[in-house]
Amino acid sequence: MNHKVAIVTDSTADIPEELIRKYDIHVVSLRVLFGEENYADGVELTSEQFYDKLRQSTVLPTTSQPSPTDFMSVYQRLLDENPDRPIVSIHLSSGMSGTYQSAMLGKSLLEREADLTVIDSKSASYGYGLMVVHAAELAEQGKSVAEISAAVEEMQQSRKLFFLVDTLEYLQKGGRIGKASAILGTLLNIKPILSIDEEGIIYAVEKVRGHKKAMARIIELFQKDLAGKRVNVAVGHTADPASAAACAEQLRSHFTLNEVIYTNIGAVIGSHVGPGVIAIFMWPVPE
């Protein structure tokens, strides 16, 4: 019987569907709410559909984490299929959501002891999706839970990420900046650069005037840590593949790119930052 480690995550990892299928990653969906309308993220509402609704909706969407029972059901199914199979479950930063705590509660609801490790990614979107995919690659190679957990922790430290926000409208609507700041920022064509700190919380790195200058600044920030190294890169976009491809070409002239992945930024991050966002996730190729 196959005892290789099973990998579980949630829909905020924004992992491309082909990689989910390739590595048999088990995904638990968060919920997206537009008023009374309620959707399973990535299942009943794709990223393309989400951004269409976001532009047209008069209400700001909200999101809700999976219940502990949602997690327990997935864990239980995997254990029913193979009671001796270890499970590693990697989730959205506990600094942004209760999803990690819900997964921990789901583990506690299991009626039997299980070799189940739940990891707080301290990140969001493909900032931890890349960790999940790497964990799944190692599982395919027959690596142990300890080896996978150590590799995920190493990636937490080595990967760098920045989000370039196109409009201040959604940060203002969500209460993250004041209305006066949003109006002034819009008039001045301010493009905030966001990242995620060591505690897994989104913060503003800098505010730069104009998209072109903001991209140049992001490249400078990446070069501080990754200049001269071979790197993998993932470009996240809000259902705008042309902008993502243009971004990757720009990066190619500054870095030695190994693997380039494109991914849609899902509803959870999208609810806070709106459409037109580009997210760049970069990590060194292991020596």
Image: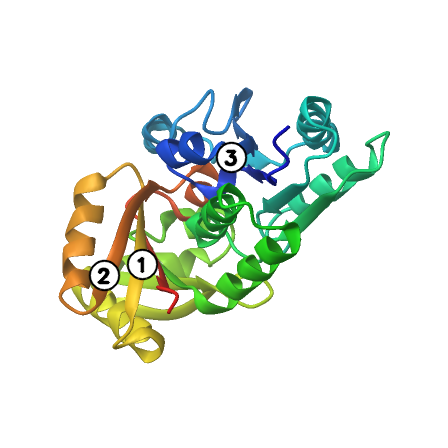
Q: Nearer the viewer, residue 81 or 255?
A: 81
- 32 left or right, relative to 184: right
Q: Around disc 1, counting alpha carbons within 10 Å, would you say few (fewer than 14), some (14 to 19), or many (20 or more)?
A: many
Inter-mark Cα distance, 3 to 2: 26 Å
Q: Quadrant of residue 78?
A: top right
Residue at point 59%, 46% (across, down): 91
Residue drawn at (16%, 61%) of the image: 252
What numbered label is drawn on residue 232?
1
174 in relation to 286, above or below: above
Assess disc 3: are there few (<14), some (14-19) or many (≥20) residues with their C-alpha within 10 Å of its C-alpha.
many
Q: Would residue 61 be seen by someone viewing this image from the given angle?
A: yes
Residue beneath the point at 21% across and 68% down: 255
Q: Position of residue 220 (x, y in %)?
A: 26, 75
Against 40, residue 169 (above or below) is: below
Q: Nearer the viewer, residue 281 or 164?
A: 281
Q: Callout 2, which amino acid? A: Leu
Q: Nearer the viewer, residue 134 or 99?
A: 134
**How many residues crowd mark 2 within 10 Å: few (<14), some (14–19), many (20+)?**
some
Q: Quadrant of the N terminus?
A: top right
Residue at numbered disc 3: 25
Give the residue type at disc 1: Asn
Q: Tag 2 or tag 3, which sits nearer the N-term?
A: 3
Q: Are marks 1 and 2 in contact (CB under 8 Å)?
A: yes
Number of the label disc, if any, that sits on residue 257? 2
Element under disc 2: strand
Amino acid type shown at disc 3: Ile
